[in-house]
Amino acid sequence: MTKIFINLSKWYKMQSYYINAYKDLYNNYGIITYVFFDKNLSKELFNSDTKEYKFFYYDSKKDLLNQLKQIKKEEIYFINTFDEMLVLLLNEIKQELWFEVSKEYKAFRNKNLQRELLFLKFPETTVSYFDIDINDDFENYTKLLSFPFIIKPTSWMQSAWVLLINSKNDLENYIINTKNLLKNMWNRWINDTRFIIEEFIDGEMYTVDYYVDNNWNFIITIITKVFLLNNLGIDDFWNYVRVSWDFTNLDIDLDKLKDFIKKHIKTFWIKDTFIHHEFKINSKNIFKTIELNQRVGWYRLEMAKLNYDYNVLTSPLGIRNEFDNKSSMAIFIFYPKKTWVFKELNNKLLDKFKSLKSFNNLRFSDSYIWKTIWLTKDWYSNVAAIRIINKDLEQFKKDYDFIEKNYNDLIILE
């Protein structure tokens, strides 16, 4: 019997690493992929169906459910989404089809609820916080504030508008930006004006992706270390590079990490899903959660394949990769150092990046040329991405340092 991997998508986007993962599922495990796109948002034409994957439209939850009910439950290998905004729909659909879901799945789309549940079960894994309405007078909250702190939307913004507030002046500037911020939120069909103010976590930032089955067994698929733009002197608080090494080179206690993961599985009663988990290890070597998302993390599907020759989408089969070291890998995401008009890339510097022994790939969209590009605290506009990969760790570090040193000079603003 042919098994079917079902992927829900808001709009048509078929990056090569999705396609390659679908082909691997079919060629090595006989699993065909059905991709369902929201008809109301997908304007582009589909590629042709292949033997490895097929495309479908849906125009409502009811329509999607009716189409999925035409597939026998025993034929469904797994139901997935890579889109954060479809997480709630995914779980509702799985329940309708009598699949197991995480008991507290709504927390994956509500950072406030995540904090609340963690405080009840394992308070050591989280930080103090309170939620506010961005439309309120901030003076109402001044007695509760202790600098520095993090401010961010409660949900839906995929980490946009996260900012480290060090002073009252920072806070006042954030308030000035509120009207523009809310306008952008409404443009994304979002009208939630609640924000979280939370204790700032010092220390190093990481992400860990894992799959949890129906019996709370889990498979770690990839761990990355993350570095933030403010480390480069940019007034922003989003990551500019994700780095993955062989597990033996990570400066992290794996046993402690696994215990940390188990606490979250118990808190949210996680079942039959992928989790993308962002956390920090603070100066006291305590693991602190930033947030959890119910999906395979951006770029992690690609990184796991290139770094460990491991297809993350095979995790529900119970395949546990040994994570033999294939290489060291980093993905640099290039953002502007201020909100301004994008003119071009610095081609001389780009040629130097391409000449590095570890250079592997460049992604660049010319659609941003002569348009305003934004700091992520205002809106998303990553202009380019460069991937480096090398089995020689010393050469990798040398090339990594060169890109990091010249990061701010790649994007030319007008």
Image: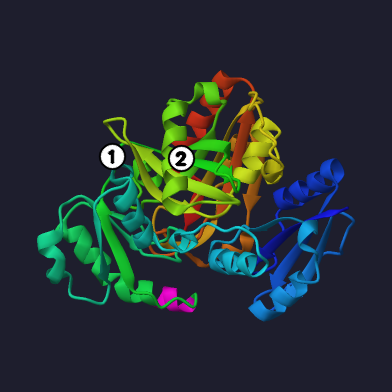
**Does the magenta portion include 321?**
no
Q: Say if 402 sits above or below 167 in the image.
A: above
Tell me where residue 100 appears, x and y as whole percent. Answer: 60, 58
How crowded pointer 1 is (Cα within 10 Å; few <14, some 14-19, many 20+) is rated as: few
Tell me where residue 174 appears, x and y as whole percent. Answer: 27, 65
Q: Is residue 173 left or right of residue 37?
A: left
Magenta stretch?
Answer: 183-187
How crowded pointer 2 is (Cα within 10 Å; few <14, some 14-19, many 20+) is rated as: some
- Which of the two residues, 22 or 345, is positioned nearer the viewer here? 22
Q: Earlier in the sequence, mark 2 or mark 1?
A: 1
Residue pointed to by mark 2: 262
Residue pointed to by mark 1: 202
Kind of residue at disc 1: Asp
**Residue drawn at 37 percent across, 75 percent down:** 182
**Residue drawn at 33 percent across, 45 percent down:** 122
- Which of the two residues, 232 or 66, is positioned nearer the viewer here? 66
Quarter of the figure with residue 53: bottom right
Tell me where residue 246 appears, x and y as whole percent. Answer: 57, 25
